[in-house]
Amino acid sequence: MQIVVNTRLLIHNKLDGIGWFSYQTLKRITRNNPDVHFVFLFDRDYNDEFIFSDNVTPLVLGPQARHPFLYYAWFHLSVKNLLNRMNPDLFLSPDGFLSPGAKCKQLPVMHDINFLHNPKDLKTLTSRYYNYYFPKYAQQATRIATVSEYSKMDISKHYHVAHDKIDVVYNGINEGFASLSDPSQQIIREKFSHGKPYFLFVGSQSPRKNLNRLIAAFDLFKERSGSDFKLVLVGAVYSSEGDVKRVIDKSRYKNDIVFTGRQPQEELEKIMASAFALAFVPYFEGFGIPIVEALQCETPVICSNTTSMPEIAGDAGLLVDPFEVNSICDGMLELYHKPQLRNQLIENGKVRKNLFSWDKSADLLWNSITRCL
């Protein structure tokens, strides 16, 4: 059996949500199925860390697919021609893109369809590309995998795909996330928040991450609590970072807001474990990986009451309205004033986290693959 896999988001030291999903599931699937030949398609030079086992053959195929015109050139032309020459049993695409015109079976992982609901969150050409082609991909797919029951419902409803054609494959939790001792936490706080407790956000500065309202809520929290807390923002800069910077500059408490940029994985794990709470209030998520990473670190979670986030956080999250600054602030104040609530969320998280592991994710994705075949 031969499976060709789109691995263009396996980029050394630059793994984000979909990249981590690809890395963790493919590492397990390739090693657990030594009799299957996997061909990994990269659109640039690759790192050997991504060649997980002897049954993986890497291929570099141009052009680099980092723009809608190049998406088309890569998936619709280069990948299609390769697939039709190789005639594999399946084309697996962890980022949801498919190859129209390819004659083999195809399985996309569509993590969410935020671009349908919030098209202005993306550059105009990218938004148009996604909204034109992803409905076609959904119809072309042999099956579809997605990362939450919410996304399954959303894809089924808007793309008119039968419910039983969509498989839910939850994300897992990277191995390094764990609780830290109090002295170790204090070392991290000295490094990143001047020794003070902090609320933490992890993610990009894309519009849907809702950083403007989070910063406004933090301002209110500081005013109403009189505390010395900080707000630490960790993640890559997005094209609209100027908007976030302007909001920070206008904040009365801008000296208490720390933007660290992207951090190495080992550092992120410690920052997460040392936070007073995760404050994760996007208005749209297909899953929300930082939520489960916080659970693993015994860090309490404040998260949005929209889309997939109540499903993922369960009783281990304090839910707030991401569209209401006062609601986000009230969540921060509740945890600040009610240590018993904070402790209860931590205890609930110790149970909740057991629902999520990359071993389970890999097994579920493999089940979806075998159902295609």
Image: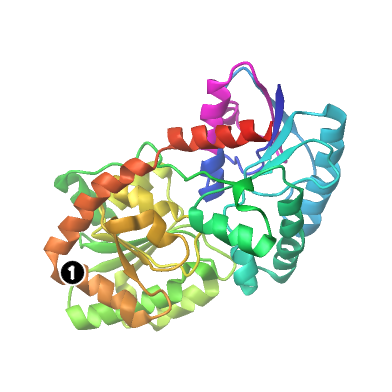
Q: What span is colored magenta in the figure? A: 23-52
Report if residue 373 is visible in the image. yes
**Residue at coordinates 63% horizontally, 34% vertically from top-left?**
371
168 vs 30, nearest the viewer: 168
Report if residue 297 is visible in the image. no
147 vs 30, nearest the viewer: 147
Q: Is residue 197 left or right of residue 42?
A: left
Vertical comparison of 320 with 110: above or below: below
Vertical comparison of 30 with 138: above or below: above
79 vs 15, nearest the viewer: 79
**Residue at coordinates 62% horizontally, 30% vertically from top-left?**
370
Q: Is residue 230 magenta?
A: no
**Residue at coordinates 29% horizontally, 77% vertically from top-left?**
329
Q: How is the image coloured?
A: rainbow
Residue under label 1, please give it: 336
Q: Amino acid at mark 1?
A: Tyr
